[in-house]
Amino acid sequence: MEKIDKKIREIASKLLKEGKVKLIIGFEKGTLPLKARPTFVRKPEEVEKLIWSSLCENNLAVYIPFYRKQLDNAEKIGVIAKGCDTRSLILHIQENIAKREQIVIIGVPCEGMLDRKKIEREVTPGIITESTENDDSITVKGNGFEKTLKKKDFLCEDCIICSHRKPIVYDEIVDIEIKEPEGVDVLNKVNEFESKEPEERWKAFTEEVSRCIRCYACRNACPACYCNECFVDCSRPQWLGTTVDSETDLQLFQIIRTFHLAGRCVNCGSCSRACPMDIDISLLVSKLSTDAKQYFGYETGVDIEGKPVLNKYSEDDSNEGFFEER
Amino acid sequence: MKDSLKNVKYIEKDKILDFIKVLQKDYTVIAPKKVKDFVLFGELKDNEEPYLDFLNSRQSPKEFYFPQTETIVEYEGIIDKRVPKFSENDMKKRIIFGIRPCDVKSTLILDKLFVNEDYIDDYYKRLRDNTLIFSFGCNNPKTTCFCASFECGPFSEEGSDAFITDIGDKFIIEGITEQGNKIIDKLPDGDGGMLKKKKEIKKNSDNVVSCIENIQKIPEKLRGMFENPVWEEISERCLGCGVCTYLCPTCHCFDIQDEMIGEDGRRVKNWDSCMFPIFTLHGSGHQPREFRFQRMRQRIMHKFNYYEENFNIIACSGCGRCVTECPVNIDVREILEKIKKL
Amino acid sequence: MIKNSYIPIPVKVDKIRFETEDKLIKTFDLVFMDKEEEKAFRYYPGQFAELSILGKGESPIGIASSPTESGFLRFTVMKVGVVTTALHNFDEGAIMGVRGPLGNWYPIEEMKGKNVVIVGGGFAFTTLRSLLIYMLDKKNRKNYGEITCIYGARTPGLLCYRDELKEWEKRKDMSLYQCIDWKFGAEGPIEEAAVEGWEPINLKEPSKTKIKKDIKKFTAFVPQLVSAVKPGAKDSYAIVCGPPIMIKFTIPVLTELGFPPERIINSLENRMKCGIGKCGRCNIGPKYVCKDGPVFSLKELEKLPKEY
Ligand SMILES: Cc1cc2nc3c(=O)[nH]c(=O)nc-3n(C[C@H](O)[C@H](O)[C@H](O)COP(=O)(O)OP(=O)(O)OC[C@H]3O[C@@H](n4cnc5c(N)ncnc54)[C@H](O)[C@@H]3O)c2cc1C
Ligand code: SF4
Ligand code: SF4
Ligand code: SF4
Ligand code: FES
């Protein structure tokens, strides 16, 4: 990890010194054990706070739309990006949030991020106060215990099924060797759920979303959710009720959001991780990703030349998704 | 709070359900329950045991005084002929069982806003008046607990009717108010040994729990800091979601909305958050808090300066929920330390 | 029983009329369904109420009637969003709700024995009308010194309460100055009357304008007209209501005329919901506009953060 930190800092410092970018978005150590967090670097002397670890779970592309004004002024922004971050950045570029040359992508191949909550569960009732990371394990310490855990057993759900861990595009790269895992596919997750009976699926879905408190962390953590006015906030017309005691509105919120992400979600899992009520939202969105792949052979953000699936029409397009009787 | 009223009782751990059942004769019992891998407060059903092996609940129990969605009035008929219908049924008294001291403190903080000489929120008051508090000492404060900063602490009894301590094989329950004492009266008497055990546990917790020193100086410090560039610095990573405010036991902002289903309608209070841009957006399009840093400033200023100025108390109890659940690890403790140093 | 502060009082829409030529602003006279409620609704000029349309929502609107006019509550409302549009769609006879009176009011006690200068712009004249009617009331007039009113809008047809303006023009116990905006050319305002009968003022140096005795209608922006009229600051209060830009430019003029900040009074507008200091929406620093305002003196505002 230290090697990667060093390399990231080198690149960042160079880009800032050479005036290639004004801002670099990366990760720094968080205030909690098992937490790294987004950070913003503007001066070469600040690059020392940049780090890399298996805790860099946030998809940093989420910040790009916040800088629209700067982007309109032709400023350039550097982003430290794993596979999924680069896919979201490509989406932003395709959707004209930024021009390709305005985003200086510092790619870091990723071996999957750790799920903090899984690790905490593993050591309950222990309270973790410290953690150290090695190549393929992580050691957590706390009030009277110390445990070393294999990283691969504690990956985020969406990282387990990620098949694009290497940055898709980049301007600078931290050149470490990683293997794209084989035989994994978003479909795995979706298939398992889809193999259930419809009633069972509906029950599982409604039970999950009934816990929703409408904090919209899922939306705000999502790099593809950047509408100026989100449909949940519209008052004229009002698409959706505003309460939490109407189950229908909670369900509708997730269903509509899911549809808005069709062919735009990169399965980074940010929504699920952000959710304070542990609702597995990404499962729902993943279904639309798999449909895009299955019916249109499209994967979001893997081809910078490509057009988003819903932005193009071809006579050979599959009609199945629309007409299939269920 | 008279000392002579002080009553120490105990229950064996495996008898807790029996006690709950006794309580349920006269009260609705709200207690911690396990949901997936975390804990939320909820009404106990028949034969349902509280889940007392927890650090704190993911969401604060504020929803039991200040529900996330609460009907104010109902109405029906065509739009220009509607009159408000409002009925106040008798409500069964409730006990919140197992609530942590920081969340009790938060309730006391909210009382000052919702029930004061200017205006009374009748909905809050009714729920509050009909609720007894059986609070629960914290044997294992989390690393993110900093209640000790706010005249509170893992064993603070302020605001409780009765106070529960886990002493290993049993719970001791101490009556604090007359009502609390009356309710626990039938339980077997505890003894000095039990109290001694409690004292040791308390001492340990008091040692473990963190404390932001000199927090009382923060409100004054913030007074001149509205224009400080620090707000931009600490808010840059903020996503502007509602997690910190919705999980916070002292955040009280709400929206009022009307909702129609066919010809039947209701007006509700819904939680709202100062972290959402539309919170302050005028009908004209004017937006007094356009940027994230302005909204972050509002959240911190409101809790640690404005609230203190209005009600003489800081609107935070150190529960740490905003710290642990923020998706990007914005840490209010860190912000406060930073402000202190400026 | 103490009244539940969230429940609207039923009222009937008695009269509706268009207030301005663009038809975006209407005035509504509301009457209480219950005489007891009417008696209990005691208000002062400057206060507001939540107009409540069940099924749509509520809007805070300044009370345009004066407590000296009994039998109705008057509101002048611009159509902007959900509630105000629903209100504009109402016919006379509709039943709706009112919640209030809310907020504080103009310093009618402190102003006793003092001169009062009212400065208004556009349709924000509502609570100023209330104040004016209140002070002009037979019982109250003697309590106040000179009353000067300076009121402007973009065009003559956008001035509110035009029938009343005509009456006030004739009154001897007050002076009313009205203005409408300049015509604009490529270079900005043009120095000629925009509309006949409206005298131009000295565009470059408004304070040098010679105001003739019988001319009370001008082509000018409100701050310029204030500068030209030069109301005396001695023993005077200035009450200013209007769009933010007007307020911004009027305040320095008043200050230059010698009005101290504690005698320049504003009424603020913030997005509101509860109106009673609970929902946390309308604060400026520690003050809630709904409960501690909407009326603030410049002196009070200077102590608050600039976040409105
Ligand atoms: C003290 C005070 C006095 C006012 N007096 C008048 C008046 O005399 N005449 C008039 O036409 N307007 C007045 N306004 C502005 C008026 O309240 C808003 O234009 C109106 O609330 C918009 O409501 P809406 O539902 O049509 O708009 P929407 O955009 O649909 O707004 C939804 C809700 O947001 C809130 N809201 C939105 N904009 C504002 C705003 N500018 N101020 C307060 N709340 C807002 C309201 O609760 C409103 O119902 C006043 C505002 C305040 C605070
Ligand atoms: S993050 Fe979770 S609780 Fe919040 S709105 Fe999304 S689904 Fe609901
Ligand atoms: S929870 Fe974190 S990201 Fe969300 S609004 Fe609060 S501080 Fe910002
Ligand atoms: S501000 Fe954070 S720590 Fe303080 S009471 Fe609210 S959620 Fe708890
Ligand atoms: S409108 Fe709710 S606090 Fe002012």
Image: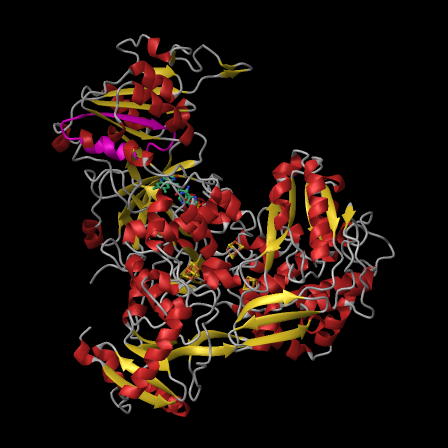
The x and y percentages for residue B70 are 40, 64
Residue B195 placement, left or right of A96: left
| Total residue callouts | 0
The image shows residue B93, relative to residue C79, as above or below, that is: below
At horizontal 31% and vertical 83% (from top left) the residue drawn is B196
The image shows residue A19, relative to residue C218, as above or below, that is: below
Task: Assess whether residue C118 is covered by the magenta stretch.
Answer: yes
The x and y percentages for residue A86 are 74, 52
At horizontal 24% and vertical 36% (from top left) the residue drawn is C106
Image quarter (top left, top right, bottom left or bottom right) of the C terminus of chain C = top left
The x and y percentages for residue A278 are 57, 69
Using the image as rendered, state which of residue A72 and residue B89 is in the foreground.
A72
The image shows residue C99, relative to residue C171, as above or below, that is: below
Residue B68 placement, left or right of B104: right
Using the image as rendered, state which of residue A198 and residue B3 is in the foreground.
B3
Using the image as rendered, state which of residue B34 and residue A190 is in the foreground.
B34
Using the image as rendered, state which of residue A269 and residue B119 is in the foreground.
A269
The image shows residue B35, relative to residue A108, as above or below, that is: below
Asked whether residue B125 appears in the rendered view, the answer is yes
Image quadrant in which you'd find residue B164: bottom left
Asked whether residue A227 appears in the rendered view, the answer is no
Colouring style: secondary structure
- Which range is magenta? C111-134
The x and y percentages for residue C190 are 48, 12
Residue B233 placement, left or right of B52: right
Task: Assess whether residue B340 is covered by the magenta stretch.
Answer: no
Residue B209 placement, left or right of C113: right
Image quarter (top left, top right, bottom left or bottom right) of the N terminus of chain C = bottom left
